[in-house]
Amino acid sequence: MFNGRKIIAVCLPKAYERISFRYISALNEYALEKGYTLFVYQTCTALYGNSRNDKGENYIFSLIDYDIIDGIIIFSELLKDKNIADKIAQEAAKHGIPAIAVERPVEGCINAHYDYGDCFEKIVRHIIVDHHLTKVNFIAGIKGNSFSEERLDIYKKVLAEQGIPYDPERVGYGDFWDYPTREVMKKFLADGKELPEAIICSNDVMAITACAMLADKGYSVPEDILISGFDGIEDEEYHNPRLTTCRSGCAEMCRSMIDTFEAVRNGGKIPDEILINFEMVKSQSCGCVKKKPNDSMLMIREMHDRLDGYQQRISDMNDLMSYISTVKKPELIHEGLKDKEMFNNSFCCLNIDALDSEMSADTECEPGEPFTDDMIMVYRGRFNDLYEPSSDTEIFKRKDIIPGFEKYIDMDRPVIFSSLHYLNIPLGYICLNVDINIVAYERIQQISETFGNGFGNVRMYNAMERLYIQDPMTGLYNRRGFYQLVIPEFEKAADEGRKMAAVVSADLDGLKYINDNFGHSEGDNAIKTVAAALVHAAVYGEICARFGGDEFVVAGVLSEETKGYSENFKKRFNDYIDNYNRESDKPYKVAASIGITCRVYDTSAVDELIKISDDLMYEDKAGRKQIRSRPRS
């Protein structure tokens, strides 16, 4: 449970596509009656494995908190990556959570599926028996496919029962799709062929194609030839004539799944399967329902309005992505989005290291790792009437889902989660709590891509900026980065007065000896060791830089007068070097000379302090009789 409500996790692709949307709507309606809230974990791809975005989309399932889940529904047939469903089921089993897999069996899950065969037999009997037809053609799906072959066997069975000989010439394979069906229909309608009285199709797509081919040839449905389909797709609702078809008992399936969770929760036995019948719908294409003209203008207007709105949102998304891409600080994101309705009732939550991580697009993430324990909320849309615009980011624990969950989330509506990523680099997630309507759900992908690509661009910009100011070998700042960061700090210190300025000059001893005797890779190792020692010694946030070769500078403004800064810095630095030399087992010793200036900062130039520290460093080097012949440039 979470916030006093029982939680059902729903795992599926593309919540905004018709089949997923229908399931979410039906589940939520019955879930409310039983006191459940849906947490929907959705992907913006079907996870076929042929998209580079698939890995980034998969991350959303790592967000599932099994400690608060009371039941989990995996739409395993819709999620084409079978490994994902298997992993979710395994985690559910570990936590003792009942899990249901819809349509494709998954080990450890209750198998929920439809009785396709029973309903398809009803529709075949209706066409052949109820309409008293004997010349009935059949368009199967993919040859060898279990669903397709089952339907072909049912066709043969009903023919045999009615004493009608099976004729292979009356059968074709349309592969469940448009183009292959057209080829089958060409064969059926070829010159010299006897026209069928009816054509039974294995799905609605093929039935709609068959109707179109008949119309092209001047035949009318159902006056000349009866047509039937199967599966009740959205396109059928706009077809003229409406198809005689079979529709899934979606609502019944959803009720049965939630009732199963309730039964298990109350100590009942976990069933092996949930079996739901399809429903046959007699309609216009077989003549059982009188045809009437569609209000084509109304449908065109509806589609035009949706397309117009979609195009406007695409334009908005591109503008907003450009805006996000220029925002270097996430806390400024509100300014550009606060008046944008497409982001209403949405949260954008980033990993704490999303914009500065070293992870590349080729980095592999282990399960459970895509999201950090601490998250940063960078955008909160207008949630109902509680919108409180703020430019401040908010750190929160991932287990809390979003900050202020109980205040902003209406648990009578599904809570939808979608991954934010740039290619397969995990950035965070979005959380939406929108009304259940298809237009609102269509925004899910757009919002995900806007934030994901926008912040991905910020991340890439930051990476390029780091390359511009960072030394690639040591990870310290280069000379350019050093001055870019230190000068503003020193200028601020001069304005405030009585601030301590510390500047350290360091130089690796004996680099030429190491290079000449052990190779340049060992010389690089010695340089990186000195760099690490300087970072270890700089405990007050000082800026560490490699000016070039074996020359280093460290500088910073101390918050208060720090006694013994020089001695303590040298001790930390030398302790690190000594410890390295003891444990490295190298045939040489790493050593460095150091000079440190630490004083109340006035208006001295940074270079003046570096020069003083440089002179002290050379005195240190001279005292150890390791003076280099060349001066510092």
Image (cartoon, rainbow, N blue to C red):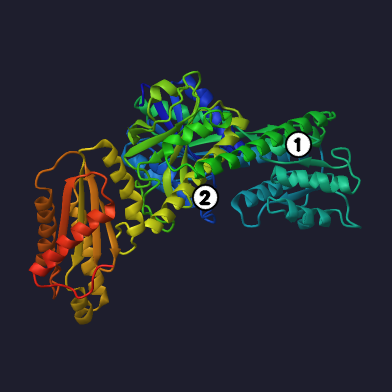
Where residue 216 appears, as percent x and y from the top left, is: 88, 48
Residue 147 appears in the rendering: yes
Residue 528 rendering spot, x and y as whole percentages: 24, 64
Q: Residues within 10 Å of mark 2 (few under 14, many from 20)?
A: many
Task: Please indicate whether residue 201 sits to the left or right of residue 393 in the image.
Answer: right
Checking the image for residue 522, the label placed there is none
> Which of labels 2 and 1 is toward the front?
2
**The residue positioned farthest toward the front in the image shown:** 603
Residue 474 is situated, as x and y percent measured from the top left of the image, at 28, 62
Relative side of 270 to 151, left or right: left
Give residue 289's position: percent from left, percent from top: 80, 29
Q: Nearer the viewer, residue 362 or 332?
A: 332
Q: Amino acid at mark 1?
A: Leu
The N terminus sits in image quarter: top left
Does 371 sit left or right of 141 as displayed?
left
Residue under numbered circle 2: 47
Please give the label number shown on residue 243. 1
Left or right: residue 130 versus residue 410 is right
Q: Secondary structure at mark 2?
A: loop
Can the viewer see residue 75?
no
The image quadrant of residue 352 is top left
Residue at the spot 46% in from the left edge and 49% down from the top edge? 56
Give yes or no for contact between labels 2 and 1 (Cβ–Cβ under 8 Å): no
